[in-house]
């Protein structure tokens, strides 16, 4: 009997403590209009099982109030709405993984996508302290510290090593990732792409290119890639990304394609051509009119021989619990499970040593240290706004590029950083003032647990005396 009471006390204490420390509770979603099989497809947590409808109107209910919904689309839908009570949200369908937080908790909401759509899974939560797998993506950057062009999903770790984990998560810079090819016909690669980036610390949704990956066609030269893809269209697309994000740094592949891959060669060639003309409003004028022009301060190519640097991916990262940057990249590559059949890894082998880069083009001089951001002031927390009509009248060559707009922006960035630091200090102070309430909450819960345990002990002793 004593053991029974003791176990009961421990269980009560564990339940109370668990409730105290638990994050967002995933709650049961009901789909009143679907069969048991269709419901299972939406709730099994697997990318491979999908609910699809040509005129999607899906009602989701729960007996517990719903504060947030996490929708994982199988493919990018057309415009859709999510409606609940008096709230209605309209979305453009650009994000495969979409988190929706309701202003007021609801018991039911409806997803309407009249052009049809397919969904892998839907999760609903009773509060907003979400588990790690939930991705709360921001829109692509307004302006980026770093723009990374990866030929395929997984190259961003295999070829560029600790670049994203270190600069995006450890340093918290604005890292915008763009993929030259799409993988929509290669499920579940689009989801692996997002899972890896989220783990790497990227918060701004990636940009996906305009050409499909052709995984089983041998592409072993730049000429072969150009025969498969419209080179000029891809160049137009990437120049638009440069003008849109106005990055301080661009990083991409080896001009020889690392181990000879033609799509990697094409990515490098696109970047090499794009940075020479992205500041010319006469070149690809549609994006110049839409975003203005931009002269990229620093451009790096993997394995470029001139102004070469060796990145230190053995540095430890606090944001990854003490992993090295290489180990963090390997961890993020681990989400690309469909690609593990090729037995590749994040390493320093001769064909894709992920430490070796060279400064292909610079407006700020050569590097004094192995740091992509050397001579570059990171953007402040609030991104700097660059006039949409910004352009340069000079016809700068590679040796004498126009520096005016970038230099002015760097000066502004320094001033903005000081202001942001003051605002951050003020915010931290405000958060500290609220901490006593949290402490009181935990102390109160702890006392409650203690009272329960004492009550159990007393009951046990009384029971023992009665038995005597």
Image (spheres, rainbow, N blue to C red):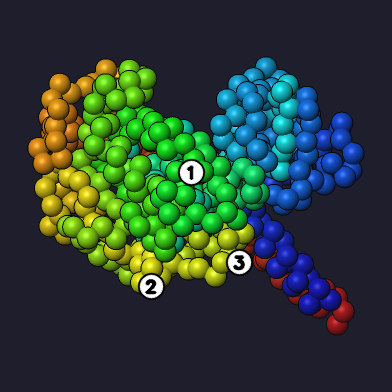
Relative horizontal placement of residue 289, taking residue 24 as reference (left or right): left
Pick the quarter of the image with the C terminus. Answer: bottom right
Q: Residue at x 36, y 64 (%)?
A: 354
Residue 321: quadrant of the picture: bottom left
Residue 63 locus on image (x, y percent): 80, 36
Q: Is residue 373 visible?
A: no
Q: Is residue 126 above or below residue 172?
A: above
Q: Secondary structure at mark 3?
A: helix
Q: CA distance from mark 3 to mark 2?
A: 18 Å
Q: Earlier in the sequence, mark 3 or mark 2?
A: 3
Report if the CB atoms under discs 2 and 1 are less than 8 Å apart: no
Pick the quarter of the image with the N terminus. Answer: bottom right
**To which residue does mark 3 refer?**
341
Q: Residue at x 11, y 41 (%)?
A: 399
Q: Residue at x 71, y 43 (%)?
A: 120
Residue 316: quadrant of the picture: bottom left
**To which residue does mark 2 refer?**
349
Q: Name the one closer to the observer, 310 or 168.
A: 310
Crowdedness near tag 3: few (<14), some (14–19) or many (≥20) residues, C-alpha within 10 Å: few
What's the mark number on residue 227? Answer: 1
Labels in figure, total: 3
Q: CA distance from mark 3 to mark 1?
A: 27 Å
Crowdedness near tag 1: few (<14), some (14–19) or many (≥20) residues, C-alpha within 10 Å: few
């Amino acid at each position: 009997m004593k053991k029974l009471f003791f176990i009961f006390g421990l269980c009560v204490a564990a339940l109370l403590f668990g409730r105290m420390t638990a994050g967002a509770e995933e709650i049961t979603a009901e789909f009143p209009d679907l069969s048991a099989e269709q419901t299972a497809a939406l709730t099994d947590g697997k990318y491979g099982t999908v609910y699809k409808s040509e005129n999607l109107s899906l009602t989701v209910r729960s007996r517990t109030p719903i504060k947030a919904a996490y929708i994982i689309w199988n493919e990018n839908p057309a415009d859709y709405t999510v409606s609940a009570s008096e709230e209605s949200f309209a979305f453009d369908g650009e994000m495969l993984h979409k988190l929706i937080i309701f202003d007021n908790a609801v018991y039911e909401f409806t997803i309407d996508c009249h052009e049809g759509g397919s969904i892998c899974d839907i999760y609903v939560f009773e509060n907003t302290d979400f588990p790690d797998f939930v991705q709360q993506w921001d829109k692509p950057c307004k302006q980026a510290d770093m723009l990374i062009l990866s030929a395929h999903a997984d190259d961003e770790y295999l070829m560029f090593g600790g670049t994203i984990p270190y600069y995006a998560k450890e340093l918290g810079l604005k890292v915008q990732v763009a993929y030259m090819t799409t993988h929509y016909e290669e499920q579940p690669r689009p989801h692996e792409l997002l899972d890896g980036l989220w783990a790497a610390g990227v918060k701004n949704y990636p940009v996906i290119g305009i050409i499909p990956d052709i995984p089983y066609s041998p592409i072993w030269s730049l000429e072969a890639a150009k025969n498969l893809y419209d080179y000029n269209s891809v160049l137009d697309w990437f120049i638009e990304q440069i003008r849109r994000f106005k990055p301080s740094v661009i990083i991409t592949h080896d001009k020889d394609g690392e181990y000879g891959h033609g799509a990697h060669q094409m990515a490098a060639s696109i970047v090499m051509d794009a940075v020479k003309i992205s500041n010319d409003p006469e070149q690809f004028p549609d994006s110049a009119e839409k975003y203005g022009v931009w002269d990229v301060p620093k451009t790096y190519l993997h394995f470029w021989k001139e102004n070469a640097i060796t990145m230190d991916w053995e540095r430890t990262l606090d944001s990854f619990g003490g992993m090295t940057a290489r180990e963090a990249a390997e961890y993020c590559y681990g989400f690309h499970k469909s690609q593990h059949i090729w037995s590749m890894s994040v390493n320093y082998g001769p064909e894709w040593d992920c430490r070796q880069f060279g400064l292909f083009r610079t407006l700020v001089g050569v590097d004094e240290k192995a740091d992509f951001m050397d001579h570059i002031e990171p953007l402040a927390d609030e991104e700097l706004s660059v006039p949409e009509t910004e352009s340069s009248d000079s016809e700068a060559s590679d040796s004498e590029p126009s520096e005016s707009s970038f230099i002015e922006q760097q000066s502004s960035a320094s001033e903005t950083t000081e202001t942001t630091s003051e605002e951050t200090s003020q915010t931290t102070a405000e958060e500290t003032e609220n901490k006593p309430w949290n402490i009181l909450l935990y102390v109160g819960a702890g006392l409650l647990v203690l009272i329960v345990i004492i009550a159990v002990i007393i009951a046990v002793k009384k029971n023992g005396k009665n038995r005597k």
